[in-house]
Image (cartoon, rainbow, N blue to C red):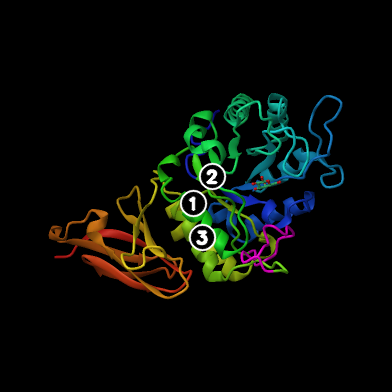
């Protein structure tokens, strides 16, 4: 690898799966690349345009090489990669550690080195690597090591995105195996319950993520509003039929804040060609993105609200400039107080110091606070603050 900063901070981009699943083609990917530029996603730091499952023919060619679907990608993948690169963006693709991908297309098992070579030839910069149809006789750990070896020696810098859904204690072995990010959860759905459960499932696992190997809580559903063609992703979360997913803009804002503070990669999953203004504002919020992209990637710690500990808590992340990013979340269904005592963050009252607070969603300064910060948070809402230490005297 030439770029020693590859994967330093969580990757940011867009992935076709959440909204389009199998309904992908050359035009869509090119339009997505256009949308990155046109709607300010590129300027906000989003970089990778990633094609997920269902891009290939069902059979390899006579030389054992993967073949792009002739109808969906009539000009091959190099042409798509060239277009994405021409926009100053990076190009991502998808394969699987097993014999087949989850949707039944050829996987890379026993083809790891030739596939890595093919991806390099096509100009791929990012590879998501799934876990379906994995032979039982060989540990997943070995298969991720294989592809990491193949990618790191294919002559091109390629981000390696492992996706084994948190199975087989992946946290414990994935960093040394060589992936730059690892999915720690099952697939996200476009509903509040799913967002909440995925976030909760990774609280307490912060120490496993970090520079060059990030804990991936799954792609974002921000702005999807029930727009997936995949019934499972689009499920309502309450089991009701007909299943219609979707969240409020407040819930999407909370989702984005959680993923940012938890150092998850920020891979957009909505149709970026048709974002509402609210969606665009959420996804391009620089004050929140800069929390996610802080160079040190320190995990956040959690302080629960003493009288509502199940639903209300703060996530606190120490930033490399000495400030703190503080997310205050209300997972419950009633308005609730969050009262953060600064001594819980390490600040002795006797120090004479306090915090100058900046609201990262309203983009305004809230003034100086000593000893504590108290606020009410609406259901499923959050407050994201940047706190800077100041002398109160
Ligand atoms: C799942 C994976 C999803 C998507 C899908 C494609 O295993 O978690 O993110 O890639 O496969 O079939």
Q: Secondary structure at mark 1?
A: helix
- Residue in the picture at 42% in, 68% down: 363
The disc, 2 or 3, on the residue closer to the chain's N-terminal end is: 2
Q: Is residue 251 left or right of residue 206?
A: right
Residue that mark 2 sits on: 184
Q: Mark 1 and mark 2 in contact (Cβ < 8 Å)?
A: yes
Residue 229 within the segment the image draws in magenta: yes
Q: Secondary structure at mark 3?
A: helix
Q: Position of residue 61 (x, y in %)?
A: 85, 30
Neighbour tally class for label 3: few under 14, some 14-19, many 20 plus, Cα within 10 Å: some
CA gap between label 3 and label 1 equals: 9 Å
Q: Mark 3 and mark 2 in contact (Cβ < 8 Å)?
A: no
Q: Position of residue 127 (x, y in %)?
A: 64, 38
Residue that mark 3 sits on: 196
Can residue 376 be seen? yes
- Residue in the picture at 25% in, 57% down: 344
Q: Is residue 288 above or below residue 153?
A: below
Q: In the drawing, what numbered circle is on residue 112?
A: none
Quadrant including the C terminus: bottom left
The disc, 3 or 1, on the residue closer to the chain's N-terminal end is: 3
Q: Position of residue 314 (x, y in %)?
A: 37, 60
**Mark 1 CB near ligand 1 (8 Å cut):** no
Residue that mark 1 sits on: 201
Q: Which residues are magenta?
A: 224-240
Can residue 16 be seen? no
Q: Position of residue 2 (x, y in %)?
A: 54, 29
Q: Is residue 195 above or below residue 95?
A: below
Q: Quadrant of residue 157?
A: top right
Q: Quadrant of residue 133?
A: top right
Q: Secondary structure at mark 2?
A: loop
């Amino acid at each position: 690898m030439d770029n020693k900063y590859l994967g330093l901070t969580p990757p940011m981009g867009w992935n076709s799966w959440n909204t389009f699943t199998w309904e992908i083609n050359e035009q869509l990917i090119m339009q997505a690349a256009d949308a990155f530029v046109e709607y300010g996603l590129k300027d906000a730091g989003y970089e990778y345009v990633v094609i997920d499952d269902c891009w290939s023919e069902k059979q390899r060619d006579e030389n054992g090489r993967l073949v792009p679907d002739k109808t969906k990608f009539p000009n091959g993948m190099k042409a798509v990669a060239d277009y994405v690169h021409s926009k100053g963006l990076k190009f991502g693709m998808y394969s699987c550690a097993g014999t087949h991908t989850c949707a039944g297309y050829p996987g890379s098992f026993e083809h790891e080195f030739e596939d890595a070579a093919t991806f390099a030839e096509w100009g791929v910069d990012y590879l998501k690597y799934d876990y379906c149809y994995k032979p039982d006789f060989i540990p997943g750990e070995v298969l991720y090591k294989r592809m990491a070896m193949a990618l790191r020696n294919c002559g091109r810098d390629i981000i390696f995105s492992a996706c084994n859904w948190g199975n087989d204690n992946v946290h414990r072995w994935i960093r040394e195996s060589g992936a730059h990010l690892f999915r720690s959860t099952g697939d996200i759905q476009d509903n509040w319950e799913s967002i909440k459960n995925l976030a909760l499932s990774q609280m307490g696992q912060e120490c496993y993520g970090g520079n060059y190997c990030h804990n991936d809580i799954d792609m974002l559903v921000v702005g999807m509003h029930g727009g997936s063609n995949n019934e499972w992703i689009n499920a309502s979360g309450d089991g009701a039929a007909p299943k219609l997913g979707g969240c409020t803009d407040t819930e999407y804002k909370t989702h984005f804040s959680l993923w940012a503070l938890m150092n998850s990669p920020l891979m957009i999953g909505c149709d970026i060609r048709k974002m509402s203004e609210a969606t665009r504002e959420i996804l391009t919020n620089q004050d929140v993105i800069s929390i996610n992209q802080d160079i040190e990637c320190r995990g956040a710690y959690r302080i629960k609200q003493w009288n509502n500990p199940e639903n209300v808590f703060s996530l606190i992340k120490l930033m490399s400039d000495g400030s703190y990013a503080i997310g205050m979340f209300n997972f419950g269904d009633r308005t609730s107080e969050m009262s953060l005592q600064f001594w819980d963050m390490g600040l002795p009252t006797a120090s004479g110091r306090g915090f100058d607070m900046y609201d990262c969603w309203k983009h305004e300064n809230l003034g100086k606070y000593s000893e504590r910060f108290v606020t009410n948070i609406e259901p499923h809402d959050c407050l994201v603050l940047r706190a800077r230490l100041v002398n109160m005297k």
